[in-house]
Image: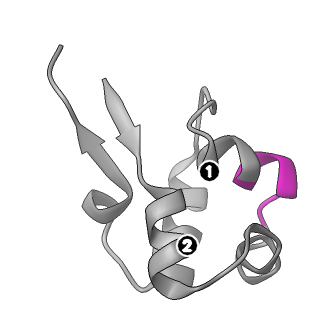
């Protein structure tokens, strides 16, 4: 299972989903799906934009949890 930690990062940075969407240019619906971990796909470009906006590495956004 892959855990998406966007909600944790937004809390850490005291940032709203709307602000993250504005900073990254990623649709609000996609940000919401990342926040609630319901997203099915994410592009490398979107990961890059999230890392820039949140000043983090991809490993800070995703965590692999073995079944």
Of labels 1 and 2, earlier in sequence is 2
Main SS, magenta residues: helix
| Residue topped by disc 2 | 10
Count of numbered marks: 2
Image quarter in which the N terminus is found: top left
What element does badge 1 sit on?
helix
Residue shown at the point (60%, 26%) measured from the top left: 40
Magenta-colored stretch includes residue 25: no
The alpha-carbon separation of the residues under discs 1 and 2 comes to 9 Å
- What colouring does the structure picture have? one colour
18 relative to 23, above or below: above
Q: Which mark is residue 22?
A: none
> Which element type, helix, strand or loop, lies under badge 2?
helix
Q: Answer few, some or many: residues within 10 Å of disc 2's Cα (few below 14, many 20 plus, some between 14 and 19).
A: some
Q: Residue at x 42, y 54 (%)?
A: 5
Q: Is residue 15 above or below residue 61?
A: below
Q: Is residue 57 visible?
A: yes
> In the picture, residue 36 is in which quadrant?
top right
Extent of the magenta region = 26-31
Asked whether the residues under the numbered discs 1 and 2 touch, taking CB atoms below 8 Å apart as contact, a structural biologist would say yes
Q: Position of residue 65 (x, y in %)?
A: 19, 30
**Can you say which quadrant of the picture contains the C terminus?**
top left
Residue, disc 1: 35
């Amino acid at each position: 299972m892959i855990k998406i930690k966007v909600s944790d990062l937004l809390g850490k940075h005291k940032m709203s989903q709307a602000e993250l969407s504005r900073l990254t240019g990623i649709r609000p619906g996609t940000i919401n799906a990342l926040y609630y971990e319901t997203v099915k796909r994410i592009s490398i470009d979107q990961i890059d934009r999230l890392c820039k906006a949140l000043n983090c590495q991809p490993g800070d956004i995703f965590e692999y949890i073995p079944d």
